[in-house]
């Protein structure tokens, strides 16, 4: 079957106690992007052992999934989408393998729309981001090797004892050396499998060994900086190689020994020598997909993989069961991981660690330096639990003007990410964020894709103009809540009597941009270096004591000490204050052109992440630019499970009969399609249909009242949301 569900149950320590794969009777999966948490509903036989809080992963592929034991699409991560969790080994939840960390010199993603007009199979990757790997001067990628029943005394999940098949699709950069693609070889025991490209000799090398003398099988393949699709495997003791669907002649192909070993790791893009603890033969380029099967695929399945549009996600859903209903069948309601991840609360109690990056400056939850991706990594490092990855370095600009103020990491992670998406937007850049089924957060620009939506491919279910989010007149305010701080002040007295009063502080005592200072309390006092007790205005300082006495309004104090002559009083106190800036912290902005065309669409918005008027004005301008127009919303249905579409793509939409296009020239017949972003995708099994909703919903919560407010805010879904942020 092309669909299966992986069910995982864990103990209190997170260890897997139950893993099962099964085909559901029915399944409905919805990926919602930023609009709401992903959700899934499925039914199984009434006797099935499923429970609330079980982890559920929905796997849907272009061919049968029965023998799929490893699946990697390299979309922002190196995590296994087969259900077996054979992932890359990382030090923390914000790390990526060293060989894909380009240290800010360029994005780790390449936007493959660059290949739109290039021939061969690159066209099928239009609309996809792929990770840029450069392991020539850095370590390779270390991967976990899982074993049956979690013990390396059992066979490994990727079993190379008999027949197996491996698919690799990659785009190499030019090199004149030998480079490694996959390393399942253990030099300490001389067991395993090593797949390399010997560029100088124009051949693929397959090194196989079971503890004796290595068998090196080779096949001719001329190197080129083009997209390669390699199919490599062993059938009844004979190695085979297909390059771009063409079978190659393999020398030394016969080798039937068991190639498994007990080392718990395998490696990508560079060979690792266990005997010398060293790396060699690094790869440079892009990996597009990597598949492992514990069987040999038939020719039809192989051709389907070769010819189909690429997919960013084979695992279409990851989450947990939150509700079970019994009947003729068991019906399970599931929430995606985004429901938990995006509802994480950012607060001073969760942000106690020092900033994770030297480029980030933060005090508590207030950032005064850092680019968006650095700030988000720092937040996830503090509020995550080593499960959430954030590998992308987009958006890569500073989100605010730090010369005027900081940015508060306020509210839920969803709140803060939506704020950053607005701040980063521009006329030439649209951003989106997405939580993947394997708990990976991806933030990047939208990209044009080539899945055509027209009369020949799909049916229009809904087509209407949507003004739910339209705003062209905005009353906007910054965070005007008082801030707290601490301060100390010294005053000199010439007498030990209580007749002399001194003002605690004046306007000029603190920074000039602070005003309306309100003293909360004196936390400590000294007179000539001796601790003094603090008394309220209606209390009496005992004779002969070191003490100070506050006025009723806490603006001044008197001091007493058993001293003669002059003495110095020093106070430490906490206070509240408000901030004034060059621009007002409450502003009204209007897009006059939009108002004249469609009328007034007002909104009142509080931006709790900002405290200054300069950045507030910038936010308001960007917000109006995003939402000043009435948006087009289109829902289309495809007859078939479309695996290549995902959140963050813009698809061409052109239905001449429904006048749904950008323009149409009747004399020439030229039709220019709309390009609308994917806001949600729904797959239905066994019906075999895909429903795609398109519209400008990348950054916002168009349907937030419907689902997310219930889950994240605990409010009734009829409550009107007064603020996006």
Image: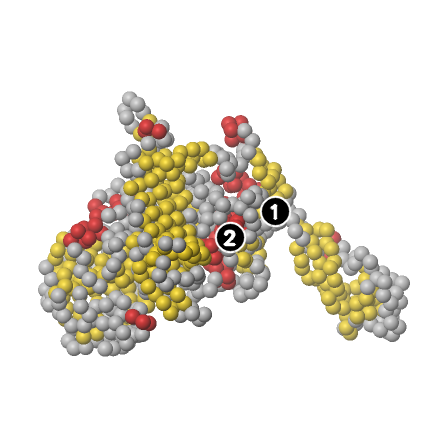
The percent coordinates of residue 3 (x first, y second) are 29, 54
The percent coordinates of residue 56 (x first, y second) are 38, 59
Q: Is residue 132 visible?
A: no
- Marks counted in the figure total 2
Q: Which residue is mark 1?
A: 478
First along the sequence among labels 2 and 1: 1
**Which residue lies at the image location 80% right of the left edge and 56% below the top edge?**
553
Q: Is residue 239 positioned above or below 481 on the image?
A: below
Q: Which residue is mark 2?
A: 711
Residue contact at pointers 2 and 1, CB within 8 angstroms: no
Q: Alpha-carbon neighbours of circle 1 within 10 Å: few (<14), some, or many (≥20)?
A: many
Q: Is residue 200 positioned above or below 278 on the image?
A: above
Q: Kindly give the residue lying farthest to the top in the view shown.
A: 667
Q: Looking at the picture, tell me which residue is in the foreground, 663 or 99.
A: 663
Q: Nearer the viewer, mark 2 or mark 1?
A: 2
> Label 2's element?
helix
The percent coordinates of residue 506 (x first, y second) are 76, 55
**Which residue lies at the image location 50% right of the left edge and 61% below the top edge?**
383
Q: Looking at the picture, tell me which residue is in the foreground, 316 or 624.
A: 316
The percent coordinates of residue 582 (x first, y second) are 63, 44
Give the distance between the C-alpha atoms of the residues marked 2 and 1, in whole angstroms: 26 Å
**Quadrant of the drawing holding the N terminus:** bottom left
Q: Looking at the picture, tell me which residue is in the foreground, 328 or 368.
A: 328
**Which residue lies at the image location 28% right of the left edge and 49% below the top edge?**
310
Classify residue 491 by image quadrant. bottom right
**Which residue lies at the image location 65% right of the left edge and 51% below the top edge?**
481
């Amino acid at each position: 079957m092309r669909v299966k569900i992986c069910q995982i149950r864990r103990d209190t320590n997170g260890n897997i106690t139950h893993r099962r794969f099964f085909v559901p009777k029915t399944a409905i999966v919805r990926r919602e992007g930023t609009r709401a948490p992903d959700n899934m509903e499925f039914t199984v036989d009434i006797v099935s052992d499923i429970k609330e809080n079980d982890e559920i992963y929905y796997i849907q592929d272009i061919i049968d999934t029965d023998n799929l034991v490893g699946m990697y699409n390299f979309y922002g991560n190196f995590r296994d989408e087969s259900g077996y969790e054979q992932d890359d080994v990382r030090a923390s939840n914000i790390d990526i393998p060293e060989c894909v960390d380009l240290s800010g010199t360029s994005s780790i993603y390449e936007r493959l729309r660059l290949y739109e007009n290039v021939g061969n199979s690159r066209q099928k990757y239009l609309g996809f981001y792929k990770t840029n790997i450069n392991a020539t001067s850095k370590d390779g990628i270390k991967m976990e090797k899982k074993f049956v029943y979690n013990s390396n005394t059992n066979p490994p999940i990727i079993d190379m004892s008999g027949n197996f098949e491996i698919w690799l699709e990659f785009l190499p950069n030019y090199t004149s050396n030998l480079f490694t693609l996959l390393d399942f070889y253990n030099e300490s025991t001389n067991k395993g499998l090593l797949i390399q490209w010997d560029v100088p000799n124009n051949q693929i090398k397959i090194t196989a060994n079971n503890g004796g003398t290595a068998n090196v099988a080779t096949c001719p393949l001329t190197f080129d900086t083009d997209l390669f699709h390699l199919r490599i495997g062993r059938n009844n003791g004979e190695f085979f190689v297909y390059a771009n669907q063409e079978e190659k002649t393999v020398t030394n192909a016969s080798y039937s020994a068991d190639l498994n070993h007990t080392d718990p790791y395998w490696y990508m893009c560079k060979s690792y020598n266990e005997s010398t603890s060293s790396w060699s033969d690094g790869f440079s380029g892009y990996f597009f997909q990597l598949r492992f099967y514990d069987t040999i695929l038939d020719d039809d399945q192989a051709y389907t993989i070769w010819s189909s549009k690429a997919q960013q996600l084979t695992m279409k859903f990851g989450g947990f069961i939150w509700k079970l209903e019994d009947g003729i069948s068991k019906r399970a309601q599931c929430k995606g991981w985004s429901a938990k991840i995006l509802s994480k609360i950012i607060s001073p109690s969760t942000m106690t660690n020092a900033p994770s990056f030297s480029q980030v400056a933060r005090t508590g939850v207030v950032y005064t330096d850092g680019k968006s991706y650095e700030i988000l990594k720092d937040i996830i490092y503090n509020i995550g639990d080593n499960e959430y990855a954030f590998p992308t370095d987009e958006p890569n600009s500073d989100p605010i003007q730090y010369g005027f103020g900081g940015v508060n990491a306020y509210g839920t992670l969803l709140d803060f990410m939506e704020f950053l998406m607005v701040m980063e937007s521009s006329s030439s850049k649209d951003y989106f964020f997405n939580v993947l089924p394997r708990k990976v957060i991806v933030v990047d620009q939208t990209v044009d894709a080539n899945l055509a939506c027209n009369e020949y491919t799909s049916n229009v279910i809904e087509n209407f103009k949507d003004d739910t989010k339209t705003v062209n007149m905005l009353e906007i305010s910054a965070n005007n809540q008082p801030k707290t701080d601490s301060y100390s002040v010294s005053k000199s007295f010439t007498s030990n009597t209580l007749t002399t009063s001194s003002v605690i502080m004046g306007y000029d005592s603190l920074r000039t941009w602070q005003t309306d200072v309100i003293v909360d309390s004196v936390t400590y006092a000294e007179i000539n270096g001796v601790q003094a007790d603090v008394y309220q205005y209606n209390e009496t300082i005992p004779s002969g004591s070191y003490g100070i006495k506050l006025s009723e309004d806490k603006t001044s104090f008197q001091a007493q000490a058993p001293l003669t002559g002059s003495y110095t009083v020093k106070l430490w106190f906490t206070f509240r204050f408000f901030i004034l800036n060059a621009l007002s912290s409450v502003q009204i902005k209007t897009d006059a052109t939009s108002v004249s065309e469609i009328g007034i669409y007002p909104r009142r918005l509080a931006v709790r992440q900002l405290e200054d008027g300069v950045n507030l004005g910038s936010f308001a301008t960007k917000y109006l630019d995003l939402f000043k127009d009435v948006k087009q919303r289109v829902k289309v249905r495809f007859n078939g499970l479309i695996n290549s579409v995902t959140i963050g793509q813009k698809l061409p939409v052109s239905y001449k009969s429904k006048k749904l296009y950008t323009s149409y020239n009747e004399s020439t017949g030229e039709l220019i399609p709309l390009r609308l972003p994917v806001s949600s995708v729904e797959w239905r099994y066994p019906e075999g249909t895909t429903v795609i909703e398109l519209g400008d919903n990348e950054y916002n919560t168009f349907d937030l009242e419907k689902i997310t407010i219930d889950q994240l805010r605990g409010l009734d879904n009829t409550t009107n949301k007064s603020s996006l942020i």
